[in-house]
Image (tube, rainbow, N blue to C red):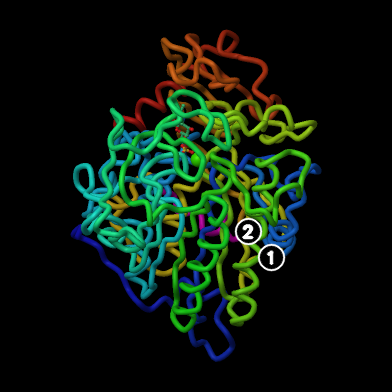
Amino acid sequence: MIKNIFYTLVIPIVFSSCQQKNTSPVKKPNIIIIYADDLGYGDLSCYGASAVQTTHIDRLAAEGLRFTNAYSEASTCTPSRYAMLTGRYAFRNDAAILPGDAPLIIEPDRETLASMLKKAGYTAGVVGKWHLGLGNGSPDWNADIKPGPLEIGFDYSFLLPATADRVPTVYVENSRVVDLDHRDPIQVDYNKKIGKDPIGLEHPKMLKMAADTQHSGTIVNGVSRIGYMTGGHQAYWKDEDFADVFTDKAKAFIHQHQNEPFFLYYALPHIHVPRMPNNKYVGTTNMGPRGDLIVEMDAMVGEIMKTLKDLNLDKNTFVIFSSDNGPVLDDGYGDHAEELIGNHKPAGIYRGGKYSAFEGGLRMPMIVRWPNEIQPGISDAVINQIDFFASLANLTGVKIDRETIAPDSENLLDALTGKSKEGRRVMLQESFTMAIRKENWKYIEPVSKKTPDWLDNKTVETGLQQEPQLYDLKHDPREQRNLAGKYPDKVAELAGKLKEIMEK
Ligand code: NG6
Ligand code: CA
């Protein structure tokens, strides 16, 4: 474990503002981060959507604090998650979208949200999409898969190892594949076909949904995936069951730990591709699977809130709802997301989406609810998910050595709980380039190539340009007017600040 960590289990100072009359410290809140996948700023009705109704999340917003300037650290999944769990910018680790057989990228001696909260007496669990790698090299899926969440602070894990569109298509509970028949061992390969299982490229007629070349590997549940696998057939998941399976696991964790402070990182696979809602939700919107999955996801949030209420935990549970990166329509499968979008604006007024350096890729829906401490309302404080670490350390009274632990996380507890409108002044943003937001100014670093090859034939606006870009987010939140030519001094200042932070 990292040295120089000083902490205390008693938290009277932090909770002085909410102490009861007898001055005994208030019970630590449970903490739940509900983290959606590829859900955009405009995808919820409480953020202005009308083509989909998200009643449970809207209730969360009505009873909590809804943010308008909240950010994921990156416009893709792995870096956003790395940064949120470690409080460290992901570029420092070179974190990028991982294949499904990548090793764990969080170093075992690095403090995580889970290991930090354990020092305050929390039991930590993760249920859902992981995508931070597992094991040391390419994991042996037939043995103990270590290191994983349990080696970096979690007490329990139930995972979809990478993404639903990547093999292996099996659940991993703690260190083991669930329901694995050892007579049918799993092998995974990201370079070449292995075994006899059909692949999308050779058997397109077997597919429920058309797929692009990158998603034309092994067919599981009628859907071809990225990568190849053989074996493990009994352990295959069924995508349409995700909502029920993850809801059961999350509820079980809450039930089991209802009498102690717990931290649950609930990483929903929704609404990432392949989009395959359960029959209960098919047709609940006119937008096809992408819209229907939003409704399914909303119901999953409702289930968690109901569980908290039933157990009388909802007043003292700090629930954070957000997403890992902006929205995308065509992400490799023929699910008609583009044709059926109608007037719906997945990124709200913002430009770009998933993979983009523009705001649509990074500005996230974010709602917090903790009735004991948070007044309902709307906040425009700038806050990044990377700041959860230092803020929650402050909340729970864990002292962290800022040189080594969560070095890029800012303690914004007052902003997070609505007691202050003051958020971050400076923030880096990652995509296929780097950007920096300082107050209302945003600078995007130029790059030599406009898109990675695999995005060439997609309608994704990456925001990558060969020229520097400078936007005034206050007067031009849609990033339409590049002011780099007009304000070279501002460009130099922000480029300098970006470099300084990156070299720190
Ligand atoms: C991309 C995949 C995309 C998605 C993404 C990760 C291709 C063409 N596209 O490489 O489908 O899986 O990785 O998404 O392979 S994320 O939300 O986990 O970052
Ligand atoms: Ca994502």
For this rendering, which residue is in front, 244 or 180?
A: 180
* Residue 504 appears in view: no
Q: Residue at x 60, y 22 (%)?
A: 471
Decide which of tag 1 and tag 2 comes sooner along the chain: 1
Identify the disc placed on residue 38.
none
Helix, strand or loop at mark 2: loop
Please indicate whether residue 376 sits to the left or right of residue 330 in the image.
right
Q: Is residue 122 magenta?
A: no
For this rendering, which residue is in front, 155 or 488?
A: 155
Residue beneath disc 2: 418
Q: Which residues are magenta?
A: 409-417
* Residue 483 appears in view: yes
Q: CA distance from mark 1 to mark 2?
A: 7 Å
From what the image shows, is residue 472 above or below residue 145?
Answer: above
The answer to whether marks 1 and 2 mark residues whose Cβ atoms lie closer than 8 Å is yes
Residue beneath disc 1: 375
Helix, strand or loop at mark 1: loop
